[in-house]
Image (spheres, rainbow, N blue to C red):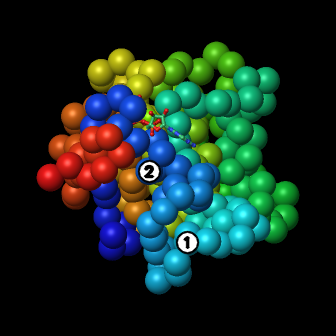
Amino acid sequence: MPRGSSLAVVGPSGAGKSTLASILGGLQEATEGSYRFDGQEMCGLSSLAVARFRADHVGFVFQNAHLMDERSAWRNVAVGLVDATLARPDVEQRSREALALVGLASVADREAAPLSGGERQRVAVARAVVKRPQLLIADEPTGSLDQKTGQAVLELLFSLTATGATLIIASHDTRAAALADRCVTIVDGALAA
Ligand SMILES: Nc1ncnc2c1ncn2[C@@H]1O[C@H](COP(=O)(O)OP(=O)(O)OP(=O)(O)O)[C@@H](O)[C@H]1O
Ligand SMILES: [Mg+2]
């Protein structure tokens, strides 16, 4: 996939969409096959090398935002920088910038708990992109949102490809397939024609 492009992975429940997304993001090891990232073969790397790949290059968004409710929005976003060697003021600044990017600069100092489902998911997107990953993996990112809020989150995710992030989105949401540069259908763990 060219940098900044987008791919939707669709298919029935249990087809293997999440499995593919987690292999591409380095969360799970492939049992066979080959996958290259930036020219580098990923299959067979040591777990340390895969962890470094994830930390350096991959941002994840899941169906649930998984925020720490008692922390402010910007501190939740800062979790995405946990592996970076940044000074504390830079961590805060980068986190606030990422919140601004998702349209939530105004809630940066608010606790996450009372935020709406859509706002929580946008905080999760900010947390995924705060380290400016080359690869953004979203697995059912609209699965817990209503139609309208889901559409806004999808548009946000796809808009982030303009910053150079390559987006891979596994989803039942047909709108994701419509927005993506390319769409593949998986059935029983294999690409369907
Ligand atoms: N590590 C694993 N080892 C063996 N089987 C697995 C493993 N991970 C997932 N599976 C199985 O692989 C199949 C695909 O699961 P996966 O979660 O990728 O599907 P999915 O397409 O994301 O489904 P959904 O639309 O319900 O999210 C399922 O039958 C699942 O039980
Ligand atoms: Mg899944």
- Secondary element under disc 2, as helix, strand or loop, is helix
- Secondary element under disc 1, as helix, strand or loop, is loop
- The local crowd at label 2, few if under 14, some if 14 to 19, many if 20 or more residues have their Cα within 10 Å, is many
Task: Looking at this view, name the residue that lies furthest to the bottom.
Answer: 39
Dots 2, 1 in contact, CB < 8 A: no
Q: Residue 36: image x %, image y %? A: 46, 74
**Is residue 180 something one can see in this rendering?**
no
Assign the N terminus to one quadrant of the image.
bottom left
> Which residue is painted at 40% across and 42% down in the image?
16
> Which residue is painted at 22% across and 57% down in the image?
182
> Which residue is painted at 74% across and 46% down in the image?
79
- Earlier-in-chain disc, 2 versus 1: 2
| Residue ID for mark 2 | 20
Task: Looking at this view, name the residue that lies furthest to the right.
Answer: 88
| Residue ID for mark 1 | 42
Task: Looking at this view, name the residue that lies furthest to the left.
Answer: 193
